[in-house]
Amino acid sequence: MPAETLQELLVEELKDLYSAENQLVKALPKMAKAAAAPELREAFENHLEETKGQVDRLEQIFNDLDASPKGKKCVAMEGLIEEGKEIISEHDQSSVRDAALICAAQKVEHYEIAAYGCVRTFAQLLGMDDVVELLQETLDEEGNTDKKLTELAESIINVEAENEGEEDEGENDGEEEKSGPSNGMTKKKAMARR
Ligand code: FE
Ligand code: FE
Ligand code: FE
């Protein structure tokens, strides 16, 4: 049944998010297990706990709205999680794979930020203050997770991934060959400054 009112649209979008979050509760432990850097594993584990709390918040909202959370599958999240699985199966564990996992995870967070931003605004328009508050809490968690992933990428993972490439390629760097070990340091600083 297609949504004909803003409230029906809100419920449809919340069902989509409920499906998305439940898919993530299953996927995040696999992402955590695949991470090479302990900091990244910890970030995934922390967000798993937050995600379980987000499922609880959605259940509370459905309860308040006297609606069922079931009946919709978020096919976008299914696809994003599938891309994460591809990364895990196609690469061996390394900091390059960590960089790819962060990229996949940030795509997930951005989908969630967009979706929660929409439902939060719908609830605002409908004057549902309690629902707005709950959705805003989750929206903040998704935004903080996205920032945390960026910090990890900039401070550790991408730097290690970059150095890994240098070790593998050895002296095939052409004219940079003569500059020796300080080369890596320079790049590291350049990455940190971004
Ligand atoms: Fe979430
Ligand atoms: Fe969706
Ligand atoms: Fe999230």
Image (tube, helix red, strand yellow):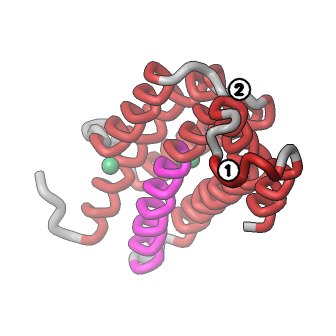
Other residues around mark 1 within 10 Å, as few (<14) / some (14–19) / many (≥20): many
Task: Please report the residue visible at 78 percent of the width from the left and 45 percent of the height from the top.
Answer: 156
Callout 1: helix, strand or loop? helix
Residue 172's image quarter?
top right
Q: In this view, does 55 lie to the left or right of 49?
A: left
Magenta run includes residue 123:
yes
The label shown at residue 149 is 1
The label shown at residue 17 is none
Image spot of residue 52 (x, y percent): 60, 35
Callout 2: helix, strand or loop? loop
Residue annotated with mark 2: 36
* Amino acid type of the residue tagged 2 in the rendering: Ala
The residue mark sitting in front, 1 or 2, is 2
Mark 1 or mark 2: whose residue is earlier in sequence: 2
Image spot of residue 192 (x, y percent): 80, 60
Image spot of residue 185 (x, y percent): 86, 52
Q: In this view, does 49 lie to the left or right of 107?
A: right
* Amino acid type of the residue tagged 1 in the rendering: Leu
**Where are the magenta residues, as a range?**
105-125
Q: Answer above or below: position of 169 versus 156.
A: above
Identity of the residue furthest to the left in this view: 1
Q: What secondary structure prevails in the magenta region?
A: helix
Residue 96's image quarter?
top right
Q: Is residue 14 left or right of residue 100?
A: left
Front residue (pair 58, 190): 190
